[in-house]
Image (cartoon, grey):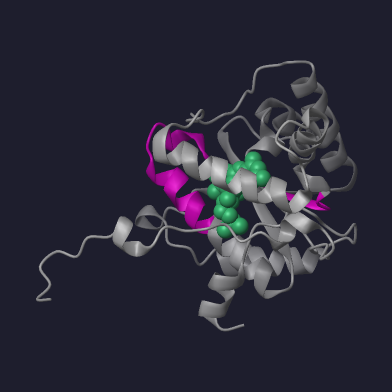
Amino acid sequence: MDFETLVRTRRSVRGYKPDPVPRDVIAEIIDVAKGAPSSMNTQPWHVHVLTGAPLDEVRRRNTEMMLAGAEPRRDIVTHAPYDGVHRQRQVDIAIDLFSAMGIQRHDKVMRQDWVLRGFRQFDAPVSLVLTYDRVLDPGMTAPFDLGALSYGICLAAWDRGLGTVVNGQGITRSDIVREVARIPDDEVIMTCIAMGYPNDEFPANTVKAKREPIDRFVRFVGFED
Ligand SMILES: Cc1cc2nc3c(=O)[nH]c(=O)nc-3n(C[C@H](O)[C@H](O)[C@H](O)COP(=O)(O)O)c2cc1C
C-alpha cells in the first residue's frame, strides 16, 4: 500500500477473527515501528506482547474487577471525563459505533455488552502492552515518543492486513497487566494495542471516525498568501 492510502484507509478494528498472529509477523511490525522518532533518540519504550493464556487472564481479571465496581488503576494520569468539543467528538464516535452495531441509546444491556468487549480488548488474539522507563517520569517526552511508536505499529500492522485498536479499556487495571505479564516496576504502563486479523463481518469495523478539516486546527504564519 502506498503511504497515503495506508493512512487514509486505516481505522480502529474492534472485531477480530480468532486466528493467531504469527510471532515473526508481530516482530516485523515492531521492527518497522521502532523507526519512530524519540526525544534525543532515547527510545524509552518497551513492548510486552501477550497472547494465549496470559492475555485471557488479563481479560478475565480486568473484566471481573471493573464489574465489581473497582476504580480504574492506571499508571498514567488520564483526563476523562471530557468536556466541550472533546466530549462532543467522543459522543460522535460512540454514536457512529453504536449505530453500526444496532445498539439503541437506551439499551443498557447492549451498551454494557459493548463496554465489556472493551474490557476484553475486543477479544483480539494479541495485545501489545507499551511501557516506558519510569526514570523519565514526570516528563512528557516519553509518552510522546510512545505515541509515535504506537502509530507506527498500527500502520505497519494495517499494511500487513492486520487490524489494531489502541485502547485504555483493556488495561484499566494496570496492576493486573503488570502482575500477569511480569512487567518490572521500573517501567510505566502507558497503553495497550489490541491486534489481530479483522473480522470483516463485524459492523463496527466499517466505521471511519471523522476528522476536523485542517482549517479548524492549523494556522499558517509568515506565508505570502
Ligand atoms: C490513547 C488512546 C486510547 C484509546 N482507547 C480506546 C478504548 O479504550 N476503546 C476503544 O474502543 N477505542 C480506543 N481508542 C481508539 C480511538 O477511539 C480511535 O483511535 C479514534 O476514535 C479514531 O478512530 P480511528 O482510530 O478509527 O481513526 C483509543 C485511542 C487512543 C489513541
Q: Is residue 39 above or below residue 58?
A: below
* Residue at point 34%, 63% (across, down): 214
Residue 131 visible here? no
199 relative to 136 in the view: left or right: right
* Residue 31 place in picture, x, y as percent: 62, 67
* Residue at point 19%, 65% (across, down): 220
93 relative to 56 in the view: left or right: left
Numbered range of the magenta stretch: 124-149
* Nearer to the camera, 152 or 68: 68
Q: Quadrant of the N terminus?
A: bottom right
Work out which residue is located at the far bottom of the displayed protein and give it: 2
12 relative to 210 in the view: left or right: right
* Residue 85 place in picture, x, y as percent: 41, 40
* Residue 19 place in picture, x, y as percent: 90, 61
Q: Quadrant of the C terminus?
A: bottom left
* Residue at point 70%, 35% (across, down): 105
